[in-house]
Amino acid sequence: MKKAASAKGAASAKKAASKAAASKATAAKASGSKASGSKATASKTSASKASSSKTSAAKKAAKGAAVKKAPAPKKVAVAPKKATARLKGTAPAKAVVHPPGDESPTALVRRARRINRELAEVFPYAHPELDFENPFQLVVATVLSAQTTDLRVNQTTPSLFAKYPTPEDLAAANPEEVEEILRPCGFFRAKTKSVIGLSKALVEDFGGEVPGRLEDLVKLPGVGRKTAFVVLGNAFGRPGITVDTHFQRLVRRWRWTGESDPDKIEAAIGALFPKSDWTDLSHHVIWHGRRICHARKPACGACPIAPLCPAYGEGETDPEKAKKLLKYEKGGFPGQRLKPPQAYLDAGGTPAPPLGAG
């Protein structure tokens, strides 16, 4: 009996020891698993932080590169609401000028006509800047004005018309004597041939009178459409557009047309205005081109139509510096005519000096 009890006790003890060992092993495994998981989590967190750090550094580097490569913002030209107000020393409101690349035909007509109205206020005394007393003198003076200034023509024609007052007189003139008179105008031989030739044509074909029709005028030697419209508009009161170098430059600068051929420019601009405005429009544009909107350095800071001009900023925008660029009466200097109209004199203009004066 005692031996059996002793054997049972020993078996129980072995079982208990076995359970305790199994429990310890399970605990050890669990502990190892937790430690391993904790290490893996820590490793993942560390890798994530490193990756985030790299991404942040990459973003900063990219941002820095973008800042370095980005070009400086282009300065937008800002035109004064009224340049004349700026010249008086006030600070007018400003308006950004947007190039009218997508301008509708209606908007173009409105802008073009507004520019003409503004120029009519600035140059109410605008007139042809060639001295003349009759259609014959005007057609001869206009032919002579090619490749020279109106001022030089006006200084030359008094001697020419004093010696040859009529087409009959000039038609019968000695070419060498005429050349000597016209020498100051440049290209005097070609011009002598033209004025003598047109005088002969007037005598032979038109009874010594300048014709009042375009188709007749353009048949005269040295007379093209530009000259014909000068004569028609200013000697006969018949509307015409004078497409000279100033007119061509300004209407393209204002983006009234992209044409470069004078005949096409004439047609394009004629479509923007009523026919009754054509002659005065020509004077306004030409006067503005000679006095303010110069070819090489326009006086943008003194321009009365700056808010309407897509080319604002091509020239001097500082008002005081721009004032120094103004020519003729706008700059306080003599005009081009020796005998200008009274309206011009009343507006403060002064006559040009005769040839050789000063």
Image (cartoon, rainbow, N blue to C red):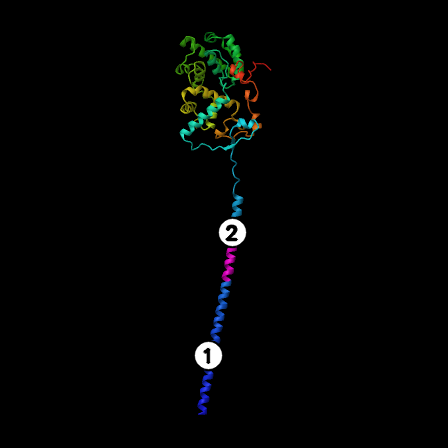
At x 49%, y 63%, the residue is 41
**Mark found first going from the N terminus, 1 or 2:** 1
Please name the predominant secondary structure of the magenta segment in the image. Answer: helix
Q: In which quadrant of the rendered image does the C terminus lie? A: top right
Q: Front-most of 239 and 218?
A: 239
Q: In which quadrant of the rendered image does the N terminus lie? A: bottom left
The reply to whether dot 1 and dot 2 touch (C-beta < 8 Å) is no
Q: How crowded is mark 2: few (under 14 residues within 10 Å), some or many (20 or more)?
A: few
Q: How crowded is mark 1: few (under 14 residues within 10 Å), some or many (20 or more)?
A: few
Using the image, tell me which numbered label, if any, was put on residue 91: none
Q: What stretch is highlighted in magenta?
A: 43-53
Q: Where is residue 350 in the image (x, y as percent from the top left)?
A: 56, 16
**Relative to 177, residue 125 above or below:** below
Q: Name the residue under label 2.
A: 58
Q: Mark 1 points at which residue?
A: 19
Q: Where is residue 187 in the image (x, y as percent from the top left)?
A: 51, 17
